[in-house]
Image (cartoon, rainbow, N blue to C red):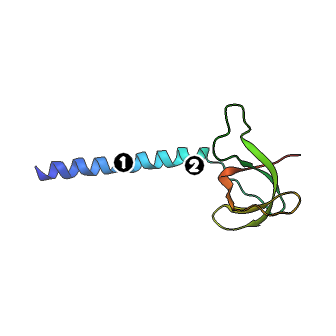
Amino acid sequence: METIRAKVRKILKARNATYKQRSEKYYNSKVRVRQFQEGDLVMKKIQGPKGVFGPNWEGPFRISKWLSHGAYELEHPDGTPEQYPWNADHLKKYYQ
């Protein structure tokens, strides 16, 4: 009795490992890596309520400093710094 349970457990463990590998491969194929250099112009995502017809992005802002783990300090084009750092997930490149 115990050997059948052990065999089933082993099969299920292998299936679970295969499922995790496939999920990871699919996720990694869809992820966009966003990296910016100091001096790049970016748009930042508007946080909070914006209404149905409100804009989704605001800017442009200039990258003033890279912090860590995808966080950036921003500054307005006139040089005044933004209050908080922003993660790269909430930024996109601004094209002139």
For label 1, the residue is 16
Residue 4 is left or right of residue 17, and the answer is left
For label 2, the residue is 28
The amino acid marked with disc number 2 is Asn
Residue at the far left in the pictured view: 1
Q: Are marks 1 and 2 in contact (CB under 8 Å)?
A: no
What residue do we see at 22% from left, 50% from top? 7
Q: Quadrant of residue 49?
A: top right
Q: CA distance from mark 1 to mark 2?
A: 18 Å
Horizontal and vertical percent for residue 76? 83, 58
Horizontal and vertical percent for residue 93? 78, 49
Measured along the vertical axis of the image, is residue 56 above or below residue 2? above
What residue do we see at 87% from left, 57% from top? 77
In depth, the one of 60 and 49 nearer the eye is 49
How many numbered badges does the structure rendering display? 2
Which secondary structure, mark 2? Answer: helix
Residue 22 is left or right of residue 61, and the answer is left
Q: Quadrant of residue 57?
A: top right
What residue do we see at 61% from left, 48% from top? 31
Measured along the vertical axis of the image, is residue 80 above or below residue 20? below
Disc nearer the start of the sequence (1/2)? 1
Badge 1 density bin: few <14, some 14–19, many ≥20, Cα 10 Å: few
Horizontal and vertical percent for residue 67? 69, 68
Q: Residue 90: give its label.
A: none
